[in-house]
Amino acid sequence: MKLAYLIVAHQNPDQLAILVHTLLVETNHIFVHIDAGSEDDFSALYALEETDSRLHILEDQFRVNWGGFNLTLAVISLFNACNQYETTFDYIFTLSGQDFPLVSNSHINAYLHQHQGTEFVEYHALPFEGWNYGGLDRIEYYWLIDEIGFSNSAAFVETQRAEGVKRIPPDRLATHGGSCWMTITSGLMKYICETIQRDWAIIYPYFKYTLISDEILIQSIILHSPFAGKIVNNNLRYIDWYSGPGFPKTLTLSDLDAAFDSGRLFARKINTNSDNDIIENIKNRMSLC
């Protein structure tokens, strides 16, 4: 299996380095977008890129604000970089810098070989009861997060709501939502890239002002694609959206039993700044699997 990991990173370069070294084996390649607003030092990662041709750090970097369009731009840039690379990969993973595998690289390869051709994408139709207002407030109002920040943008949305102002979502591009962390084939990735390029004149002016557009645009493209019949509604990540504090929950040692029992390939999210032992514990348990 030739695998590509597309990583969105914004902090904790030491933890990112552990993730990269864990996944950068054999024919695997890693593409990384580093948040332009990060103040952390990623020089060690750039040094590794100079010595290992399988690591690719994007030159175009966006300042990512939570909920803003720039995260979608970062993901699109990663897809484009991977799609334009000389190697065709069997599977592509989108990851955050706070993800970590729960199984070995050989287990990942075996799992994907067994399910070859399946697209692993978490999705739900909009409106979705698990999101505030069914998620429709994300697409029906103007969110100016990258311009004025989240709090001011939320206040502006309330003004629009009170005045009865609503946007009309574009057909087929704002019908589904879900996690932006997915595992897909190169064929589907190519379809996503081509669709975005073709419809960019519609996508950019609309999704630039959509809340958390990374959880809507790509999912909607996928669910209206020729690959829709191959999708399994499972992104292969263990994510705790319910326990808190924080959503998703930052996992600790006490969460590892549930993570390993889930049968998922990756866990999210992990922060070694708050739990320095968690990755070593995961590695130890991986070796026993």
Image (cartoon, grey):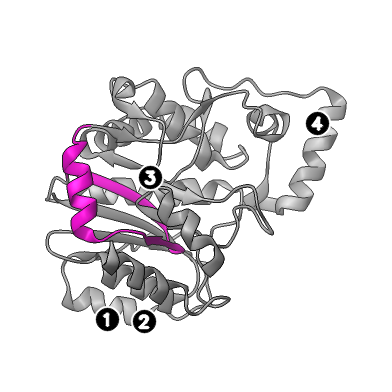
Q: Nearer the viewer, mark 3 or mark 2?
A: 3
Measuring from the top left, give residue 1's x and y in whole percent: 13, 49
Task: Please report whichever mark, 1 or 3, sits nearer to the chain's N-terminal start.
Answer: 1
Q: Residue at x 50, y 80 (%)?
A: 276
Mark 1 highlights which residue? 47
Could you tell me which residue is drawn at 52 percent across and 39 percent down?
215
The reply to whether callout 3 and callout 4 are in contact (CB within 8 Å) is no
Q: Amino acid at mark 1?
A: Ala
Which badge, 1 or 4, is on the more N-terminal residue?
1
Whether residue 281 appears in this view of the structure is yes
Label 4 sits on residue: 160
Q: Which residues are magenta?
A: 90-117
Is residue 116 rendered to the left or right of residue 9? left
Give residue 43's mark.
2
Which mark is first along the chain, 4 or 2? 2
Mark 2 and mark 4: Cα distance apart in space:
44 Å
Name the mark nearer the viewer: 2 or 4: 2
State how far apart marks 1 and 3 are (Cα). 31 Å
Q: Helix, strand, or loop for circle 1?
A: helix
